[in-house]
Image (spheres, rainbow, N blue to C red):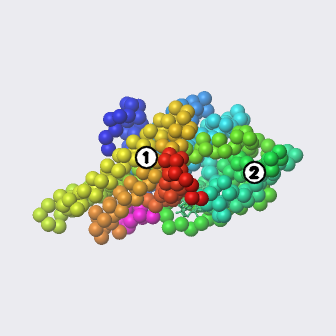
Amino acid sequence: MSTDIEPREHTELRAAVSALGRRHGPGFDRAALWAEAGKLGYLGVNLPEEYGGGGGGMAELSIVLEEAGAAGAPLLMMVVSPAICGTVISRFGTDGQKEAWLPGLADGSRTMAFGITEPDAGSNSHRITTTATRTEDGWVLNGRKVFVSGVDIADATLIVGRTSDARTGNLKACLFIVPRDTPGFGRRHIEMELDADEKQFELTLDDVHLPADALVGDEDAGLLQLFAGLNPERIMTAAFAIGMGRYALERAVGYAKERQVWKTPIGAHQAIAHPLAQAHIELELARLMMQKAARLYDAGDDFGAGEAANMAKYAAAEACVKAVDTAVHTLGGNGLTKEFGLARLVTASRVARIAPVSREMILNYVSAHTLGLPKSY
Ligand SMILES: Cc1cc2nc3c(=O)[nH]c(=O)nc-3n(C[C@H](O)[C@H](O)[C@H](O)COP(=O)(O)OP(=O)(O)OC[C@H]3O[C@@H](n4cnc5c(N)ncnc54)[C@H](O)[C@@H]3O)c2cc1C
């Protein structure tokens, strides 16, 4: 993929991560790659230097995830641990929370999961009911979450809850760090049709007692803080999808150059070549929008970044689904074998279309916010 519009440091970062990813390659040991990428500073490129990070932003972090994915070694927890949780703690955490978490998130020795989705709220996060009640010395959380990734390997989960506003009676979103083994914090593995090391969990919070400093940031600015973490999540989901799409496309192009059943390799047939060319174009376009979103976010424009991050996530997910579908078809019967390893991506490629925000919710957002059309829901 050509990367001419990038600064030299980005191209170098891309090449270094790509080499690391290819060394680990498909069938990789997730924990080993995570540890090595952390040690080399790649997992914390977006975190502040004073806490062991690289001092960069989402532009750099998205390169790391894209290149690992393009090498066939995606690190899903990067979407959550350094991107959402690292960002929220860096921007809104107390000095104590920053010291406790950022160095570990930056070098990969600690991981954090992120739980917002609830069984009865789904796409409508305004409807979440996980409730935080103040006690004399802290908080008590009660509620349920679903589909939360990596809770078993994370040292803690950043849980989105609500507090009751004593003045208005309204419920307000706020964020709590819940360590994995806190009493009352239960998890049940949800079996998914996904061939990935990172598992999804249903969580129960049953009178989970937390100290006062478990609350991240200001109780009164919860929604703003939440959105500061959700834009990086969308940018990183785009990077995840573009990486996967590139991986599938590269395998298919290699195959189409070699495989010959008539006079020329199958890649000479336009029925095979054109869909591959289209997939490449659409991945490149999605990446441009992802770069725009990252640039706006890193420049501090949360509002502009929100729109671009939504569009980037949409475009990347669609490009990924199409690239994987095209790749599987290019390989004929081999596209469905375990040996060639592309069929397993058919399910995986759908993830970015659904999470963290579905294709339809992005279309709703663009219809209503960008185009000013009336809302249906
Ligand atoms: C692999 C995976 C990992 C995940 N990891 C995490 C995680 O780490 N943490 C976390 O908190 N969550 C996680 N999720 C959850 C994910 O964010 C949700 O699945 C997603 O937000 C959609 O919610 P839902 O599944 O409840 O779907 P629903 O909200 O029930 O939506 C179902 C369908 O209805 C459509 N729909 C809903 N409302 C509208 C509307 N107004 N207009 C048009 N269409 C609509 C949706 O687009 C979708 O197609 C993960 C999900 C997956 C699949």
Which residue lies at the image location 77% right of the left edge and 50% below the top edge?
170
Residue indicated by mark 1: 66
Which residue lies at the image location 61% right of the left edge and 65% below the top edge?
189
Residue furthest to the right: 136
Asked if ligand 1 lies within 8 A of label 1, the reply is: no
Report x, y in % for residue 332.
Answer: 28, 68
Q: Which mark is residue 301?
A: none
Asked if ligand 1 lies within 8 A of label 2, the reply is: no
Quarter location, residue 256: bottom left
Left or right? Give the position of 74 relative to 263. Answer: right
Quarter location, residue 181: bottom right
The front one of 16 and 284 is 284
The front one of 100 and 48 is 48
Magenta part of the chain? 337-347
Please tell me whether residue 339 belongs to the stretch shown in magenta: yes
Disc 1 or 2, which lies upstream in sequence? Answer: 1
Q: Nearer the viewer, mark 1 or mark 2?
A: 2
- Is any atom of residue 21 visible in this view? no
Q: Main secondary structure of the magenta part?
A: loop
Residue kind at label 1, given as amino acid type: Glu
Report x, y in % for residue 111.
Answer: 60, 47
Please tell me whether residue 336 belongs to the stretch shown in magenta: no
Residue kind at label 2, given as amino acid type: Leu
Residue indicated by mark 2: 171
Ligand 1 falls in quadrant: bottom right
The front one of 314 and 242 is 314
